[in-house]
Image (cartoon, helix red, strand yellow):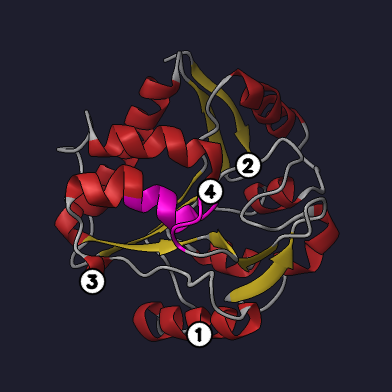
Amino acid sequence: VRGKLKKYANMNIHSYSGAHEAIEALTRRMADRMLGSAGNFHVALSGGETAKRLFPLWSGPFADRLDWDRIRFYWVDERCVLPDDPQSNFGTAERLLFSPLAVPASHVHRIRGEQPPETEAERYTHLIGQVLSGPDGIPRFDCVVLGVGEDMHTASIFSEKSFLLTAEPGYRVSIHPRSAQMRITMTGPLILAARMVLVPMLGERKLATARHLAERQNDRSPAGYLLSRAE
């Protein structure tokens, strides 16, 4: 562990010697939070390259670090594709995490990327509202695992879709600015309502992104906006 880089608003940014050490620290944070809670532990996962490095460690050397029977899985965002499509975030998790760990299908609540996007965004918003709403009516995940792109997007909230940073807590349809691929994503207030937000940035390519976040306190990108407000 190289130590803490800098406190970014309400979040701490730590640097580690490699992906293995970073994911070990993230897993330890989750395990500690689970020890302090009771009942099911509701986690929202991201996809992308970070997931492809995270999930094999969770289902391999770190498989005994978390109480998988207590965890219920959801998604931060999903591409509007079939679940067996190589681009599906659910498909990646099924192949690298759920299948190796024999996670029961009843513990996995996927976004149905093959359904009409607006209809599915509404259905998923209703689902989490039923399962996770607190006394104030706002759904609260126990843990949200975010990724940050090199263009500083997070979830599927891109600079071109910045209204999603402040949209009503739930899920909305987004569009990738370059590929025009449709996606379903958490809105900013739902992310910020989570009891814990973890943001692994793995590999040399993400080092510049981490430094950017640490050094620019008033960054207006989607990632900068959310990380400056997360508890």
Secondary structure of residue under mark 4: loop
Is 211 in the magenta?
no
Secondary structure of residue under mark 2: loop
Which residue is under mark 4? Answer: 146
Q: Quadrant of the N terminus?
A: top left
The quarter holding residue 160 reads bottom right
How far apart are the two marked residues, 3 and 2, measured between alpha carbons? 29 Å
- C-beta proximity under 8 Å, tags 3 and 2: no
- C-beta proximity under 8 Å, tags 4 and 1: no
**Amino acid type of the residue tagged 2 in the rendering:** Val
| Neighbour tally class for label 1: few under 14, some 14-19, many 20 plus, Cα within 10 Å | some
Drawn side of residue 187 relative to residue 36, left or right: right
- Residue 32, x across and y down, in percent: 25, 44
Front-most of 146 and 173?
A: 173
Which of discs 3 and 2 lies nearer the camera? The answer is 3
| Neighbour tally class for label 3: few under 14, some 14-19, many 20 plus, Cα within 10 Å | few
**Amino acid type of the residue tagged 4 in the rendering:** Leu
How far apart are the two marked residues, 4 and 1, measured between alpha carbons? 22 Å
Which residue is under mark 2? Answer: 148
Which of discs 4 and 3 lies nearer the camera? The answer is 3
- C-beta proximity under 8 Å, tags 2 and 4: yes
**Amino acid type of the residue tagged 3 in the rendering:** Ser
Upstream in sequence: badge 2 or badge 1: 1
- Residue 200, x across and y down, in percent: 50, 36
**Amino acid type of the residue tagged 1 in the rendering:** Arg
Which residue is under mark 1? Answer: 123
Residue 28, can we see it?
A: no
Which of discs 2 and 1 lies nearer the camera? The answer is 1
Is the residue 108 above or below the residue 91 in the image? below
Upstream in sequence: badge 3 or badge 1: 3
